[in-house]
Image: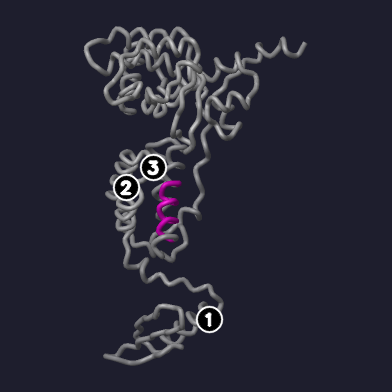
Amino acid sequence: MATISSRKNKWHVRIRRIGQPTIAKTFLMKQDAEKWARSIEIEIDRKTYINNNLAKKTQFKDILQQYLKDVIPHMRSSRDAAIRLKKLMRHPLAKYNMAELSPKHIADYRDERLKVNKPNTVIRELAVLSSIINHARREWSLNIINPVSMIKKPPSAEGRNRIISDEEINKIIYILKNTRGTFHNNYMALLVEFALETAMRRGELTSLRWEHVNFKTRVAYLALTKNGTSRYVPLSIKAIFILNNLSRSIDGRVFPLKNNSVSLSFLRASRKANIPDIHFHDLRHIALTRLCSKISNVLELAAISGHKQLKMLQRYTHIKAENLVSKLD
């Protein structure tokens, strides 16, 4: 029931319903107060009313801060996620309160980011924004419609088709082997060779531990992968040879390197070799393409690579048409 009272030449409206927090608003004219009260009561009766008082008092920056405190520490890539979130907190978008954060604001942010980033990067950033807002809606009683869900996402770019030749890889490995003088460089060349034998991701390589390598069965156990599950990776004779040539680190990891250091070292070596447009993750493309010539069963290949969707696996395999000719006869 709505209560309308007059104080100091203003009309104050209070709406009280059982099971609902009190809704209040002030107007200069009585007819505006009555009209607003009727509209809110109709929405409550229809169960369409959204109380956004909390959203009006909460800046997006506050939500990001709370997410940084409560959620980020439990994520696997917490350090990188925290850096990205702190950067977002400095963006003008963070200054809006959650009630006024509109699809237009998100669309402007999307267009701004597309000027300096590729579409797939912006799509991932929008997914992070959406996830944060949805978390606030579920866990922190923030009654708003997610504005990210109401804008058009950039079209996804096709996956990388960069085919790296054996000559290019050999040049990079040679440079890594002949760049001496640091603890880091002693591992990099062998890590690249091991990646080509196993098709393991960068994070899987740097988190692999010696106690998870079974030399007898020639299998490496990955306790936690990008997909959030564990898997076993078969090891070739060359992969075992590489492991036998590695010195043991006191921290128990096979390759005691940081993810960013691995990517940076690989990038520097590729530049020194004058090889453009190549990333460490491209080694996974090469490894899976090579495995395709040995393993024809795509399910077996997925078991090695850890892909849950066979469609995603197609992005990493490059089967040449000329190699299929003999299979047609």
Q: Give the residue pinned by disc 2.
A: 88
Q: Is residue 197 magenta?
A: no
Residue found at x 39% / y 14%: 243
Give the CA separation, mark 2 to mark 1.
39 Å
- Residue 113 image label: 3
Callout 3: helix, strand or loop? Answer: helix
Eye-nearest disc, 3 or 2: 2
What amino acid does circle 1 point to?
Answer: Ile
Q: Report, in whole angstroms, how far the alpha carbon at label 3 lies from the one at label 2.
A: 12 Å
Point out the image quarter for the C terminus: top right
| Total number of numbered discs in the rendering | 3
> 248 above or below 143?
above
* Residue 95 at x, y percent in the picture: 30, 57
Q: Tag 2's secondary structure?
A: helix
Residue 179 position, x and y percent, is: 27, 10
Residue at horizontal 52%, vertical 30%?
306
Q: Is residue 278 visible?
A: yes
At label 3, counting other C-alpha atoms closer than 10 Å, the crowd grade (few under 14, some 14-19, many 20 or more) is: some
Query: Residue tagged by mark 1?
Result: 42
Mark 1 vs mark 3: give the one in front. Answer: 1
Query: Which one is earlier in the sequence, the residue at label 1 or at label 3?
Result: 1
Label 2 with label 1: CB-CB less than 8 Å: no
Q: Quadrant of residue 328?
A: top right
Instruction: Assign the magenta stretch its main secondary structure.
Output: helix
* Secondary structure state at the residue bearing disc 1: helix
Circle nearer the N terminus (3, 2): 2
